[in-house]
Amino acid sequence: MLPDKKFRVQLLLIILALVVLCLVPFLFTTGAMREFYISEGGPIQIFSAAGYLIVVATLVRELSWEDLVKRWYFVVIPLAMCFREMDFHAHFTTYNITKTTLYVSKDVPLYEKVFGASVFFVLGFACYSLIRNHVGAVRRSGFYSNQAAVAVLAAMICVVLSKMLDGAASNLAVFGISIDGSYLSVVFEEVLELGIPLFLMVAAFSAFPRPVGGAPAQHVSAFESRYDRV
């Protein structure tokens, strides 16, 4: 594992970077550039997708083939999040696969419904496998002593906060409060979504630290003992 001080510095640097990225469009951009900053295919979205790919590449590089097969969900979940960031969930079906309309509409081909349902089944099983195989071990070993777990928690906080911002208008409408999504809230939402892969990168790097010199400190055996005891 990375030294505690270095790990804390990494988390603080990411938080600082996210704050700066929230300020950039207001301090250094105007007009079309400001809109492009948070647009589909803009820099924030591209960096988010790239972050997930770095997480996947790190895991594929560090884990043995046997370990990758056993812990397939470590790769599937961030890869799915990358596809979601690039809007793949809306590109291959008549409607977004997260929309009920896809599954109830008579105009949607059966194979599209099966495809959407299959995606949710695989991701649901992946999340279940992750929780079942690792949450208990992390809890018994001491959550706050596990740097990868702390980084994953930070990523989950970003997920919750970004979703709260994303659904704020519709949620408040239930109580009779009408608000329009402001540029500021969209910036916060997009930057928080970028925070998810950044913290996951820290988690992956913490699980596979490298000493000065570049050689892996410990490999699959250490990973086995750290995360496989349930």
Image (tube, rainbow, N blue to C red):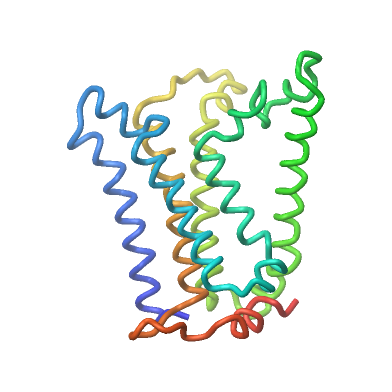
Tell me: 105 left or right of 145. Answer: right
> Residue 39's image quarter?
top left
* Image point (52%, 52%), residue name: 157
Give the x, y percent position of residue 41.
40, 33
Tell me: 230 left or right of 45. Answer: right
Would you place residue 209 above or below residue 76 in this image?
Answer: below
Give the x, y percent position of residue 98.
67, 31
As drawn, which residue projects farthest toward the top? 107
As drawn, which residue projects farthest toward the front? 65
Would you place residue 199 above or below residue 110 in this image?
Answer: below
Q: Nearer the viewer, residue 13 or 79?
A: 79
**Which quadrant of the rendered structure holds the C terminus?**
bottom right
Would you place residue 113 above or below residue 15 in this image?
Answer: above
* Image point (76%, 19%), residue name: 108
> Residue 143's image quarter?
bottom right
As drawn, which residue projects farthest toward the left? 28
Give the x, y percent position of residue 19.
31, 49
Give the x, y percent position of residue 227.
65, 76
Would you place residue 72 above or below residue 185 in this image?
Answer: below
Q: Nearer the viewer, residue 43 or 131?
A: 43
Q: How many marks?
A: 0
* Image point (35%, 76%), residue name: 6
